[in-house]
Amino acid sequence: MDFALTDEQRRIQDAIRDFGEREVKPYAAAWDRDEAFPREVVARLGALGFLGLGLPPDVGGRGADALACALVVEGVARYDASLGLTVASHAGLASGHINQFASDAMRRRYLPRLARGEWLGAWCLTEPGSGSDAAGLCTRAVRDADGWLLTGTKMFITQGSVGHVYVVLASTAPELGQRGISAFVVERDTPGLRSGRKIEKLGLRASDTAEVILDNVRVPPGQLIGEENRGYKQALRILDGGRISIAAWCHGIGRGALEESIAYVRERRRCPSPALRGMESTLAEMAMRLEAGRVLLCRAAHLKDAGRPFRAAASMAKLVCSEATMWATTRAVQFQGGASAGRDQPVERYLRDAKLGEIGEGTSEMQRRVIARALLSGGLPTL
């Protein structure tokens, strides 16, 4: 297996690193402190093509592969996990769902503006009573002569109050359970659609997270994505790809924590102490755990691009990257001690941000279930 990046992937990696150093790193702490969504920076990412990188050229994208898209998410999260999550959710979930399953007319209506960052996308699956159990959602979509009437509440929606295009999962046949879920596109100005309360979070404070309330929202028939009652299967496919993005997002945070820790230990070497050897050992352990996750990430992206089954591989990558990053950020704070406690210190922010990696887009427990099912069904032939 060749682990080298292609020339195009290297150019993308270099470009996003340059953008992060100039446009993100100097401001990330202030965005976090003020809980400020960086609209202008998101718009610049769109103008540079980073928000539509993986979309086909016919709708304004560049047709980049899964690893190239992961490099963008990783590169942004290295400097600001909140902004990295905006990129991952907009490009991988909302735009990705429309691109994969919507009609050609719907794709051409929405994707060019989403690719340019003129519109932001929000993917509305989670509800107050359903998270990892997506089949338990209660939002209803009732058909009538004029289309569909949507009613329900979505929770923890990224871009929930700043989005322009909402992909909403709703039950169209409650008696069928998960086999009766459909997906719809709802535009922000549709009567009855509104943002609820803003969610105050442990970390990711510059990421817009809010309730989305649908109060008798009427949408025409053409806003149904794909076939009726196919939304749950669509969502599973989107989540598989999304876990590759979240693995990359986690790795970016972990890499940032490692780089800050390396700089700290180099500074401590000027005045050697008995604790220095232990710190060096911790650095080695950080690097090994993070690199193991990155190898799994690259493998999952390779399988996706090759058109081969990648669900279990994506779960492995997401699980290992998230837990490695949680471990690395915890150790980064621990061995910097009191120096890391200030709100403007990067490792303190990395630790708070990293926790979502073990929860979002399927908890660690859910990932283990996915992997176990693949093992029991013979779905991991490479082992």
Image (tube, rainbow, N blue to C red):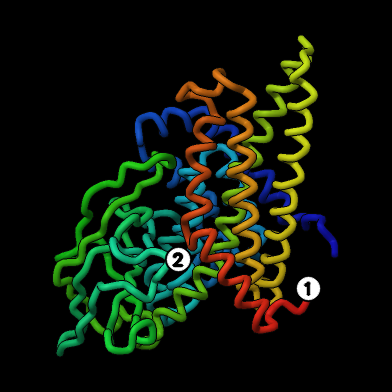
Give the x, y percent position of residue 321. Answer: 63, 52
Q: Amino acid at mark 1?
A: Leu
The answer to whether any part of residue 348 appears in the image is yes
| Quadrant housing the C terminus | bottom right
Return the residue at label 2.
95
Residue occupying the point 69% across, 44% down: 14
Give the x, y percent position of residue 188. Answer: 25, 61
The answer to whether any part of residue 40 appears in the image is no
Q: Which mark is residue 383?
A: 1
Q: Amino acid at mark 2?
A: Ser
Q: Left or right? Give the position of 97 relative to 326.
A: left
Residue 314 position (above or below residue 204): below
Q: Quadrant of residue 306?
A: bottom right
| Quadrant housing the N terminus | bottom right
Residue occupying the point 35% across, 68% down: 167
Asked if the residue at tag 1 contacts the one at tag 2, i.e. Cβ–Cβ closer than 8 Å, the answer is no
In the rendered structure, which disc, 2 or 1, sits on the residue that comes first in sequence?
Answer: 2
- Who is closer to the viewer here, 383 or 229? 383
Residue occupying the point 49% across, 75% down: 236
Label 2 vs label 1: CA separation?
34 Å
Residue occupying the point 34% across, 81% down: 181
Residue 156 position (above or below residue 380): above
Q: Quadrant of residue 305?
A: bottom right
Q: Which mark is residue 35?
A: none
Give the x, y percent position of residue 158. Answer: 38, 54
Q: Left or right? Give the position of 37 relative to 261.
A: left
Q: Secondary structure at mark 1?
A: loop
